[in-house]
Image (tube, rainbow, N blue to C red):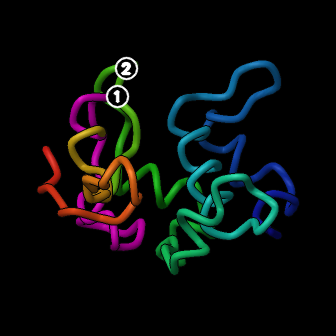
């Protein structure tokens, strides 16, 4: 991805990617881009592989991302998509707690199987 190799101007201008100190916000932006664009990322299959993308102005420029999303209000918060099937874009991201993120996962059905045949007996509703 070219925006990681095009010089220091977009990174150092905002002071979030200095040698030895990468901020939470820069790390969140970088990881978001990697999950959605880098097919070698271990998380690509759950993001880019599902069609999840990054709004082009954010992908191109950390400063635009930072301006729109803002600093994380607390160190413990992480970047979260409000609609898990939606892109990383204005109106669909927030800084969220671990608990909020756990409640905002794609639901996996709870399946009850017959212990002898292994056949599905019924699908139980998800707890989230």
Instruction: Assess whether mark 2 and mark 1 are in contact (beta carbons under 8 angstroms).
Output: yes
Residue at (22, 62) in percent of width and height? 121
Q: Which residues are magenta?
A: 82-101
Q: Can you say whether 49 is above or below 111 in the image?
A: below
Q: Tag 1, which secondary structure?
A: loop
Residue at (31, 21) in percent of width and height? 74
Name the residue nearer the viewer: 25 or 121. Answer: 121
Q: Can you say whether 33 is above or below 101 in the image?
A: below
Residue 86 counted in the magenta span: yes
Query: Residue 14 at what x, y percent from top left?
Result: 60, 41
Query: Residue 27 at what x, y percent from top left?
Result: 61, 38
| Disc 1 to disc 2, C-alpha distance | 4 Å
Q: Main secondary structure of the magenta part?
A: loop
Name the residue nearer the viewer: 78 or 123. Answer: 123
Give the side of residue 128 with respect to residue 84, left or right: left
Q: Residue 67, which numbered label?
A: none
Query: Residue 98 at what x, y percent from top left?
Result: 31, 29
Residue at (37, 20) in percent of width and height? 76
Query: Residue 112 at what x, y percent from top left?
Result: 25, 53
Q: Tag 2, which secondary structure?
A: loop
Residue at (51, 74) in percent of width and height? 53
Q: Which residue is mark 2?
A: 76
Q: Residue 77, which numbered label?
A: 1
């Amino acid at each position: 991805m070219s925006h990681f190799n095009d010089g220091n101007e977009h990174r150092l201008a905002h002071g979030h990617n200095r040698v030895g100190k990468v901020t939470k916000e820069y790390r969140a932006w970088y990881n978001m881009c990697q999950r959605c664009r880098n097919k070698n990322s271990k998380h690509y299959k759950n993001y880019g592989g599902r069609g999840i993308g990054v709004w082009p102005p954010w992908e191109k420029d950390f400063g635009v991302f930072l301006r729109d999303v803002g600093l994380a209000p607390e160190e413990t918060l992480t970047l979260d998509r409000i609609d898990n099937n939606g892109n990383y874009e204005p109106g669909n991201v927030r800084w969220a707690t671990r608990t909020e993120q756990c409640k905002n996962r794609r639901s996996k059905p709870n399946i009850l199987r017959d212990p002898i045949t292994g056949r599905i007996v019924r699908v139980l509703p998800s707890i989230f």
